[in-house]
Amino acid sequence: MALKVLAPLSGAVVPLAGVPDPVFADALVGPGVAIEPAADATEARAPIAGTLVKVKPHAFVVMADSGQGVLVHLGIDTVKLNGQGFEILCAEGDAVGAGEVIVRWEPTEIRSAGLSAICPVVALDATTVEDVAAGGVSTGDALFTWA
């Protein structure tokens, strides 16, 4: 079943190979793309409708009714911040709509801490994605299709 995945935040689309983390760059958790967030991209939204099966300050996974899960990871090595600079707005197990705000954060603070604010958006356990966006995206724009 094809699943349209939306941009969880605005910014510039970057191939996963451009992410400064080998787990994402080598697509070890699945295919997708990353977004280098715009300065005003302070809300991370659900890229699909479904159930919030995992939520941490720096990352969350939404599972569609079809069983397809999408990971949104806010920055690289941001787990080291122990939640500082992140505000979780939903709980694990919540039903969420595509575009619903899950986490508020400050990409500029992440960069000020010397970390990358780039946000991988990954189709977990998928083999390929199609119709991948390029250039700039706004929150809610089509990012890729999981065929």
Image (spheres, rainbow, N blue to C red):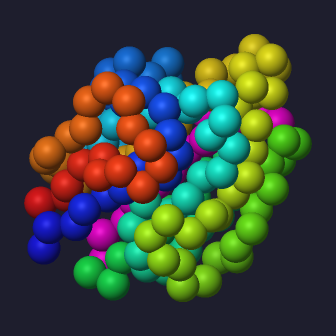
In the picture provided, is 70 more to the left or to the right than 127? right
Q: Is residue 28 visible?
A: no
Q: Residue at x 87, y 42 (%)?
A: 84
Quadrant containing the C terminus in the rendered view? bottom left
Q: Which one is nearer the viewer's eye here, 145 or 81?
A: 145
In the picture provided, is 113 more to the left or to the right than 62? right
Q: Which one is nearer the viewer's eye here, 1 or 10?
A: 10
User: Is 2 in the magenta?
Assistant: no
List x then y, in percent, for residue 81.
Answer: 82, 36
Q: Which one is nearer the viewer's eye here, 109 or 140?
A: 140
Q: Is residue 100 visible?
A: yes
List x then y, in percent, for residue 62.
Answer: 47, 68
In the picture provided, is 146 more to the left or to the right than 99? left
Q: Residue at x 65, y 76 (%)?
A: 92
In the picture provided, is 59 more to the left or to the right than 112? left
Residue 50 sits above or below residue 25 on the image: below
Q: Quadrant of residue 53?
A: bottom right
- Which residue is situated farthest in the right direction here? 84
Residue 81 sits above or below residue 6 on the image: above
Quadrant containing the N terminus in the rendered view? bottom left
Q: Residue at x 19, y 58 (%)?
A: 146
List x then y, in percent, for residue 82.
Answer: 84, 44
- In the image, the segment drawn in magenta is 67-81
Residue 135 sits above or below residue 132 on the image: above
